[in-house]
Amino acid sequence: MRNIDLKKEKQKIINFIKTYFKNADFSKGIIGLSGGVDSSLVTYLTVEALEKENVIGVLMPYKTSMDDSFDDGKLVAEKLGIKYYVREITPMVDAYYDTYEPDADRLRKGNMKARARMCTIYDLAAKEHALVLGTSNKTELYLGYITQFGDGACALEPLGCFYKSEIWKLANIMGVPENIIKKTPTADLWEGQTDERELGFSYKDADEILYALYEEKASIEELLSQGFTEEQIQHIISIVNRNRFKQSVPPNPETHTI
């Protein structure tokens, strides 16, 4: 895995946020607070870049959300002293499925929850005249482990150049509460869901393989020599390839590539 100076990278992200907002002529940023390490870290960085009075959090629980998701999101908002909204998405999600698609599976419902949160945060962004900051990391973006036009919708992606393994370290440097850093990663889209169980591998293994394959241009043989299995490698490659459509803006006839 790569070795980078995270303290220097921290300042680079803060400068990036400052510059982006200045060039866009916005002073306020708004962030969906899930209670996870990624959204918490983005909030900490944005407060340092824009000052707390210019940062807004949004907590968007669903009826099956874990209690600690809400509690930890609120903890971050109150610890940093930022304004925050609570908007439960249960009524809007359930109204659609109860009325039209009562037999929908949990994946469809999970994607709807992510998009309901996107609609909510963009509405509040319009109210506050704020830019939406994304909370996805490089691992998730490579794997397409985002909902298109859900949590993948944002004006800027401050953590998009950092692997999940690096997010945990940077969160520690920034002073994100330890219980948030150590909690099991989950999108909290259905009861009992965890990222690593759904993906079928650990973030640590994913980071090592993704970095070797796509940044160091290592061969599969080199990865096998590092102790990874053919099954692990091919599984990750297949997920990346399957979700490439999420990695760029929608194509038009002049820009179409695959």
Image (cartoon, rainbow, N blue to C red):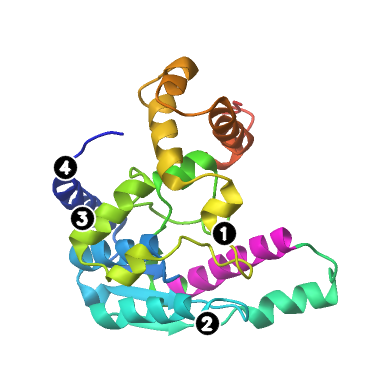
| 165 left or right, relative to 88 | left
Mark 4 belongs to which amino acid?
Asp
* SS of the residue under disc 2: loop
The magenta segment is 106-125
Q: Nearer the viewer, mark 4 or mark 2?
A: 4
- Seen in the picture, residue 183 relative to 24 is either above or below; the reply is below
What number is the disc on residue 87? 2
Q: Position of residue 2 (x, y in %)?
A: 27, 33
Q: Nearer the viewer, mark 1 or mark 4?
A: 4
The residue drawn where x is 44% and y is 25% is 213
Q: CA distance from mark 2 to mark 1?
A: 16 Å
Sequence-wise, which precedes: disc 3 or disc 2? 3
Place residue 154 in its image quadrant: bottom left
Residue 159 seen by the camera: yes
* SS of the residue under disc 3: helix
- Seen in the picture, residue 25 relative to 237 is either above or below; the reply is below
Residue 124: in magenta span: yes
| 212 left or right, relative to 11 | right
Residue holding disc 3: 14
Sequence-wise, which precedes: disc 1 or disc 3? 3
Residue holding disc 1: 150
Residue 86: in magenta span: no
Place residue 64 in its image quadrant: bottom right
